[in-house]
């Protein structure tokens, strides 16, 4: 297979090394939602940094959003799945995350 990097879930399930946004660690599947976990290594100044990211998919399609925790990613998936994406879904997810992080 060619070395074309991709975000297409059906391809990266078979060929994890082709994931565009870093080194694929694992894929969580929860009903119609998928969260692709990756490590992205890059240079930040004089240091080499690796960040873990959680990329959100609904019905096998990327929503073009990622999060820094699996909880945040699940909230993004749910909001975008419920509201079919867009600014309203982002606002709903942001409100839910605020409730989650401010709860006792």
Image (cartoon, rainbow, N blue to C red):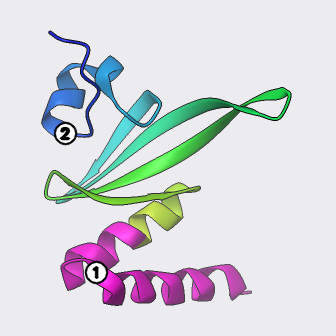
Magenta-drawn stretch contains 28: no
Q: Main secondary structure of the magenta part?
A: helix
The secondary element bearing badge 1 is classed as helix
The percent coordinates of residue 14 (x first, y second) are: 18, 21
The secondary element bearing badge 2 is classed as loop
Q: Give the residue drawn at x 48%, y 36%.
A: 38
- The disc label shown at residue 8, or none: 2
Which of the two labelled residues, at mark 2 and mark 1, occupies the earlier sequence position? 2
Dividing the picture into quadrants, the one containing residue 9 is top left
- Number of numbered tags placed on the structure image: 2
Q: Where, quadrant-wise, is the C terminus in this rendering? A: bottom right
Dividing the picture into quadrants, the one containing residue 19 is top left
The percent coordinates of residue 64 (x first, y second) are: 33, 58
Magenta-drawn stretch contains 92: yes
Q: Which residue is mark 1?
A: 86
Q: Are marks 2 and 1 in contact (CB under 8 Å)?
A: no
Give the vertical position of 43 relative to 52 (above or below).
above
Q: Give the residue drawn at x 25%, y 33%.
A: 6
Q: Nearer the viewer, residue 74 or 65?
A: 65
- The disc label shown at residue 40, or none: none
Work out which residue is located at the far front of the displayed protein and give it. 45
Point out the stretch of residues depicted in magenta: 76-104
Q: CA distance from mark 2 to mark 1?
A: 20 Å
Q: Give the residue drawn at x 24%, y 21%.
A: 4
10 with respect to 22 (left or right): left
| Disc 1 crowd, CA 10 A, few/some/many (<14, 14-19, 20+) | few
């Amino acid at each position: 297979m060619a070395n074309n990097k991709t975000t297409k879930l059906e391809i990266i399930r078979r060929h994890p090394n082709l994931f565009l946004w870093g080194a694929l660690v694992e894929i969580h599947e929860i009903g119609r939602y998928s969260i692709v976990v990756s490590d992205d290594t890059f240079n930040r100044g004089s240091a080499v940094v690796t960040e873990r990211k959680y990329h959100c998919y609904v019905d096998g399609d990327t929503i073009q959003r990622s999060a820094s925790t699996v909880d945040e990613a699940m909230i993004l998936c749910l909001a975008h799945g419920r509201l079919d994406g867009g600014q309203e879904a982002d606002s709903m997810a942001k409100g839910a995350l605020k409730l989650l992080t401010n709860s006792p």
